[in-house]
Image: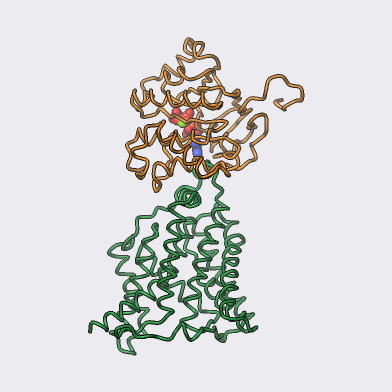
Chain colours: A green, B orange
Amino acid sequence: MMVASLQVIVDGLSIGSTYALLALGLSLVFSVMGFVNFAYGSLIVWAGYAIAVTDSVGAPYALTILVMVVFTVVLSIAMGRFAFRPFITAPPATLLLTSFGVALALQAVAIFVFGEAPRHVPTPPVLIESVSVGGVRISLLQILALGLSVIVLVALNLLIQRTTFGIEIRAAAEDSKAAQLMGVRPPKVLLVVFAISGVVAAVVAFVWFARIGTVDPRADLTPTLKAFIAVVLGGLGTIRGPVIGGLLLGLFESVLASFLTTNLLAFQSAFAFGLVILVLILRPQGVAGRVVELAK
Amino acid sequence: MGSPAAGRTSPAPALSALGIEKRFAGVTALDGVDIEVGQGETLGLLGPNGSGKTTLVNCVSGVVRPNAGRVLIDGIEIGHLSRDRRARAGLIRTYQNLRLFTDLTVAENIEVGLLAQRGRPREQRRNLVRRSLAEQGLEDVARLPVSELPYGAQKRVEVARALVSEPKVLLLDEPGAGLGSSETELLSEALRSARSRFSCAMLMIDHNVNLIMGLSDRIVVLSDGKVLRSGTPAEIAGDPEVISVYLGQVPQKLPR
Ligand SMILES: Nc1ncnc2c1ncn2[C@@H]1O[C@H](COP(=O)(O)OP(=O)(O)OP(=O)(O)O)[C@@H](O)[C@H]1O
Ligand SMILES: [Mg+2]
């Protein structure tokens, strides 16, 4: 029993840490621009294709990951530059709709280029082989997922809290018009934020596809939804919120997976949404969030 | 008119706003206002509530676009520039209603004031922030979220944030509003010492006539979106029309 519950916690934390990163990438853009970027999952999907395509021309795994990271960051910056920057002064609802448009467009291009069928994304076996530590099965990938999440979190926290750049981002996030009067360039801040959220997406994509092993054009929905749920659970407006939300969601899923019978497991997402509704009713600002006011 | 002609003897004014007109749906807030602030000069701007003082600052800082008129810094047209480019050109303003970043600490808020100038080394930025905190007596609260400070201290943070970059042109919209007399004295002192440390043209709005009279080299009085009078503090203080238009309404505009 002891071991079983430890296993649930290890599994939950490792998947939860990936959700936490996903949620962080989403909430970063939200806190600066005031909209939920529904095209965020498309970044993950295209990152998957970047690995698959680089692999199909015979590149070693490490190179496929390197190419994927560069590609994802560039794609994220391009998204910010061409899809969102032109609407930088528009109300958040416009940006929200734009993000739906971008998600649909990126999906359509993926279907056109790669077809509907899933593509294989390689994973070195050493990453996913589980070893038993005192009866708890754990893979190198799970450890990497946790480790990478911690590194990204610490780095991001330092960047936001300790650097001039972080001050610029936070000032622009709170009151971009006043920040402008102090010389802050919101368009530049936007691009930097998209670049950072691209790096986070690339880290997530690495872990995500190593675990799943395939990519298809409609695979953006799951990461976007997970990020969205985690953000709602944890709350917006802080770094802490999405992280706690992501970990909670991971643990919740892991607990469900250990208790539910196979035919009930199909409804795992329904349970997750049930939890979201519950949180929204009981604590609309999330478990660890603050009340966020949208700047006009 | 004010083109920086070659061979001109006196330098162009630090700030000129010429023929500024601003209309809001039915209200003419500014009706052809001309003001000039010389290099290193402090210009006081007086006028009853709604006379267009804040709107003038908004037009100059780029917060609103005037319907007509030109804005120049050192004789160079800036009317087409965005707010952030004006800030980087050395034009900094404060707000009548505090507009601090409540998520940031006191020190961070002041550091935002340095964002207009890229390329200052980190060490220098730190020293500037430190000096600015000391000047305003804010060292002890430097690490606190600015929202936890009392109003008067927040007002000092706003002034510190505006002064820290040593701007070329400073627009102060009622920096003394809501301050007690000792706090007003501190403010006056801070502005004076800033002025003596770096040459800075100031356009200062306040309803506290003593504060304005004490600091200004020259005073402009606005009324109904037009310049009613312009002159030295002594001339303005003795002008019967100013007294009737502006000072005559004293009961409504005593500092809150
Ligand atoms: N954004 C706006 N929209 C509509 N009308 C405005 C706007 N800003 C100012 N006005 C109007 O323009 C006129 C001038 O206002 P302004 O704020 O410039 O006055 P002020 O001299 O700063 O007054 P106070 O001493 O009360 O601060 C007022 O009639 C005001 O109602
Ligand atoms: Mg005003």
| Position of residue A282 measured from the top left corner of the image (x, y, whole percent) | 27, 64
Residue A50 appears in the figure: no
Residue located farthest toward the bottom when viewing the structure as drawn: A262
Residue at image location 46% in from the left, 37% down from the top: B161
| Position of residue B62 measured from the top left corner of the image (x, y, whole percent) | 57, 39
The quarter holding residue B68 reads top right
In this view, the residue in front, B33 or A179, is A179
Residue at image location 47% in from the left, 12% down from the top: B237
In the rendered image, the quadrant that contains the C terminus of chain B is: top left
Q: Is residue A64 left or right of residue B163?
A: right
Measured along the vertical axis of the image, is residue A214 above or below residue A250? Answer: below
| Position of residue A162 measured from the top left corner of the image (x, y, whole percent) | 44, 51
Residue located farthest toward the right when viewing the structure as drawn: B6
In the rendered image, the quadrant that contains the N terminus of chain B is: top right
In this view, the residue in front, B75 or A213, is A213
Measured along the vertical axis of the image, is residue B198 above or below residue B115? Answer: above
The quarter holding residue A138 reads bottom left
Q: Is residue A241 left or right of residue A87?
A: left
Measured along the vertical axis of the image, is residue B132 above or below residue A31? Answer: above
Residue A49 appears in the figure: yes
Residue at image location 58% in from the left, 62% down from the top: A77
Circle count: 0
Residue at image location 39% in from the left, 57% down from the top: A237
| Position of residue A102 measured from the top left corner of the image (x, y, whole percent) | 57, 68
